[in-house]
Image (tube, rainbow, N blue to C red):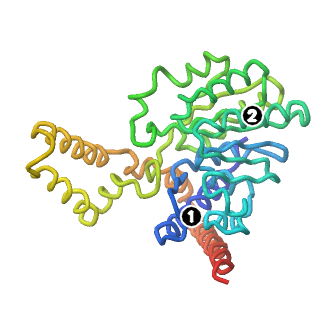
Amino acid sequence: MPPESWSLYTLMLRSRLFEEAVAGLWRDGLISGEMHLGTGEEAVIAGVVSQLRDGDAMALDHRGTAALLMRGVDPVLIVRELLGRPDGLCGGAGGHMHLFSREHLAASSGIVGAAGPTAAGFALAAQYLHPGSIAVAFFGDGAMNQGMLMEAMNLAAAWSLPVLFVCKDDGWAITTRSEGMTGGDLSARARGLGVPAVEVDGLDASAVWEASRAAIARARSGLGPTFLHARCVHDEGHFLGFQLIRIVRDPLREMPGVAVPLTRSFVHPGGAALRERLEGLGGVLTAVLSTLRDPRRDPVNDPVRRARLALQTDPARLQELEDQADREIGHLFATALADVAS
């Protein structure tokens, strides 16, 4: 039987609050570089990670924070790592895209598709050294066009490696629609490599739990890998601060920074022909209008909100759980930042 909805919601809520606090640090300039959040993936991660046990391994992509938190990695060490501190999880050298925990057999990489061969390596070791243990690879749909991921899936099928390949499909490859650059069906592609494929609603944690349960049991029993195709929505787009989403959320503040230079380039006497300028302007407007209709803006596509709706029959318990999670996240960030300040 799946864990109760309260347990899954607690994992998801804690992850969401943590990443929202990370976003605040990034906006305040305390975290440098790009920031790729996993907000919107919580149901996929919770449904799978809640079933892992000691000895299981995780190969993560550049959105590995939620999986590490749910696996039990010290969140204060993660915060310190994101701040670039030498007392961080990886000595301040990994940042948010290259987080590792030897204790938890967890490794992340910013190289697209790298989770595949990493998980295959974990699984091969488990097959020989710890029978019954498995490895999980988390990656996006864009990674399905990387050769090393395809090679890892082929090897896992040929050697019956205990791997669960989890594709978190949000329909985008950075800022390009996946349908415009990916041929065929992803599940059919996996089956073509000899890996059974399962489709699941990645916004429903219980559905993910049920879909991955059989796949995990199959891997533990030595019957080989499974491909889990979970459709989800990235709330913040590919990276935090994605400009089109900023424009839609706060047009009065963001549009002048786009409209003014566009207008200047449009009326400038030199440069491209008027037809080309009109085409460029039309492309910008189309992108903005498309974002207005983007599923990332629809609350119904928020997995944390969806999980919460099912628990509103007990408002007192729900409020207590949320207050406790909020206090916990606030305390751990205060601890991490206090150490930094000292």
In the figure, is residue 322 to the left or right of 123? left
Task: Give the residue at the far right of this rendering.
Answer: 129
Q: Which amino acid does the dot numbered 2 rest on?
A: Ile
- The residue located at (44%, 38%) in the rendering is 172
**Could you say where residue 135 lies in the image, as x and y percent from the top left?**
76, 37
- The residue located at (76%, 24%) in the rendering is 224
Q: Quadrant of residue 337?
A: bottom right
Task: Give the residue at the far front of this rendering.
Answer: 270
Q: Which amino acid does the dot numbered 1 rest on?
A: Leu
- Give the answer, above or below, for where 299 lies relative to 217: below
Foreground: 281 or 2? 281
Location of mark 2 (residue): 216
Q: Quadrant of residue 111?
A: top right
Considering the image in quadrants, where does the C terminus appear?
bottom right
In the figure, is residue 151 to the left or right of 121? left
Q: How many marks?
A: 2
**Could you say where residue 296 lies in the image, as x and y percent from the top left?**
40, 48
Mark 1: which secondary structure? helix
- Mark positioned earlier in the residue sequence (2 or 1): 1
Location of mark 1 (residue): 17
Considering the image in quadrants, where does the N terminus appear?
top right
**Could you say where residue 251 lies in the image, as x and y percent from the top left?**
26, 61
In the figure, is residue 189 to the left or right of 285? right
- The residue located at (77%, 34%) in the rendering is 121
Foreground: 257 or 105? 257
